Image (spheres, rainbow, N blue to C red):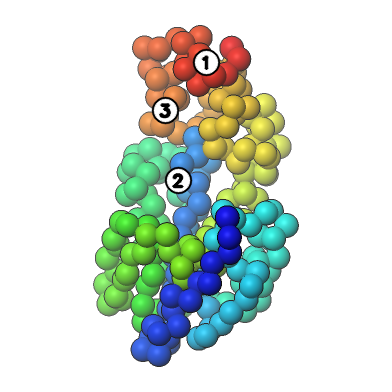
Amino acid sequence: MAKANLDFELNLWKEYNLIVGVDEAGRGALAGPIVVAAVILPIFFHSSLIQDSKILKPLQRNKAYGVIRKNALEYSVVIKSPREVENKNPLQATKEAMVEATLKLKNKPSLCLVDGKEEITISGIPTQSIIGGDRKSINIAAASVIAKVTRDTIMKNLHKKYPRYDWENNKGYPNPTHLQAIFKYGICSLHRKTYEPIKSLVSGKVDRKTLCQKYNCKG
C-alpha cells in the first residue's frame, strides 16, 4: 500500500488549534484487549515516518511510535479487557474507549477526529468521523500507531504466559496458527467468547472437527 499525504488537517488547523485523532487496535482479534489511543500533534506537524499503522512494518511502527511520543503535545491510551468487549459488544466498547481516551487528555481538544464511520459524542468537543481516517489524517494515523504498538507489546508479553497460541506473531488475530491452537487446546480466559469460531466452539453445538474443516485448520 502506498503512503498517504495525511493532509486532512491542513485547513482545519487554521480554525482548530488542538486537534485530537482517535483510533483503535484489536477490535477484530479473537483474544486480548481492544486498545484505543488519542493523539494531539502540534499545528502543521509533519513526519514521513507517521502513517497508518497497517502499512508500516514493525520496525517502522516502532520508529514512528518514538517520533509521536517525542513530538506529540499529548496522548492517552485506554484499554478494554476481553470481558468488557464481550459484555458491551466490540463496537460499544470501542466507542466508549474513544470517549474516555479523549476526556483523559489534560488539554481539552478543540476538535476530535475519529477513524471509521461510527460517530461518538463528547460533551463540549465537536467530533468528526472519517472513513479511512488513518490514511487521511496525521493525528488519526499517529493514534493508530500508538494503539497498535501498545497492543502488540501487550500481546507479546501475554505470549510468554500462553505460548501455545503464538500471540507473539498473530497478536490474537484469527490466523491459521492461532485457530489451530484454539481447536486443539481450547481457549483461555483472554479469548472473546462472543467471537466466532470461539462462540460455536464453547457452545458445543459444532464439534471441533467440523470447525477445523470450515476454517481450513488441522485438527
Is the Cβ of the residue at disc 2 closer than 8 Å to that at disc 3? no
User: What is the CA distance from the residue labelled 2 to the residue labelled 1?
Assistant: 23 Å
Pointer 3 local density, CA inside 10 Å: few below 14, some 14–19, many at least 20: few
Q: How many marks?
A: 3
- Residue 124, position as x, y percentages in the image: 27, 77
Kind of element beneath mark 3:
loop
Between the C-alphas of marks 1 and 3, the distance is 12 Å
Figure quadrant of residue 85 = top left
Please state which amino acid type lies under the numbered disc 2: Arg
Badge number at residue 73: none
| Residue at the spot of label 2 | 27
The residue singled out by tag 1 in the image is 212
User: Residue at image x 39%, y 70%?
Assistant: 113
Q: Amino acid at mark 3?
A: Glu
Residue 145 lies in what quarter of the image? bottom right
Residue at (39%, 52%) from the top-left corner? 94
